[in-house]
């Protein structure tokens, strides 16, 4: 089943985000290579493709996991969590309808 993982950034987390990004992307690439990643990306803090120093307010990952516990376990192990980028992470079942 698909699961939506929404991480909400702590204030002023841009430097921590940039430092942890390679490890964060490596885990996403693993999901992609396994055919389990639907989409992933950050929420810019301003209405711009590249928000610069304004940074980001969080991220969205939609990926396939065996169950909610597996999705939660994966989300809890994200480098953005251990680096203090995310203040909290929500994990919810997701039903893809379109496209």
Image (cartoon, rainbow, N blue to C red):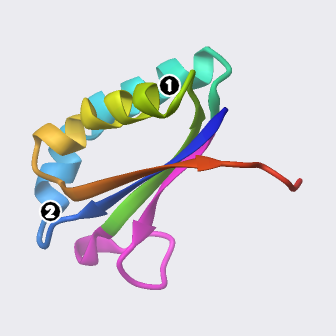
Q: Which residue is rendered at x = 30% and y = 72% of the image?
A: 52
Residue at mark 2: 13
Q: Is residue 26 left or right of residue 34?
A: left
Viewer-nearest residue: 25 or 50: 25
Is residue 28 visible from the viewing direction of this image?
Answer: yes
* Quadrant in the picture for residue 46: bottom left
Q: Position of residue 18 (x, y in %)?
A: 21, 49
Q: Which stretch appears magenta? A: 38-56
Residue drawn at 53 percent across, 23 percent down: 31
| Residue placed under numbered mark 1 in the picture | 29
The percent position of residue 3, horizontal first and vertical second, equals 57, 42
- Which residue appears at 13% of the width and 73% of the height? 11
Residue lying at the far right of the rendered structure: 99
Disc 2 secondary structure class: loop
Q: Is residue 19 magenta?
A: no
Q: Relative to 19, say whether 31 is above or below.
A: above
**33 or 3, which lies in front?**
3
Q: Nearer the viewer, residue 81 or 53?
A: 81
């Amino acid at each position: 089943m698909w699961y939506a993982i929404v991480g909400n950034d702590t204030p002023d987390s841009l430097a921590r985000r940039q430092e942890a990004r390679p490890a964060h992307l490596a885990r996403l690439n693993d999901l992609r290579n396994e055919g389990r990643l639907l989409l992933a990306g950050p929420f810019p803090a301003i209405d711009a493709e590249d928000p610069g120093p304004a940074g980001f307010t969080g991220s969205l990952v939609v990926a396939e996991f065996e169950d909610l516990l597996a999705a939660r376990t994966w989300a809890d192990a994200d480098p953005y969590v251990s680096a203090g980028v995310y203040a909290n992470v929500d994990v919810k079942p997701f039903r893809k309808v379109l496209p």
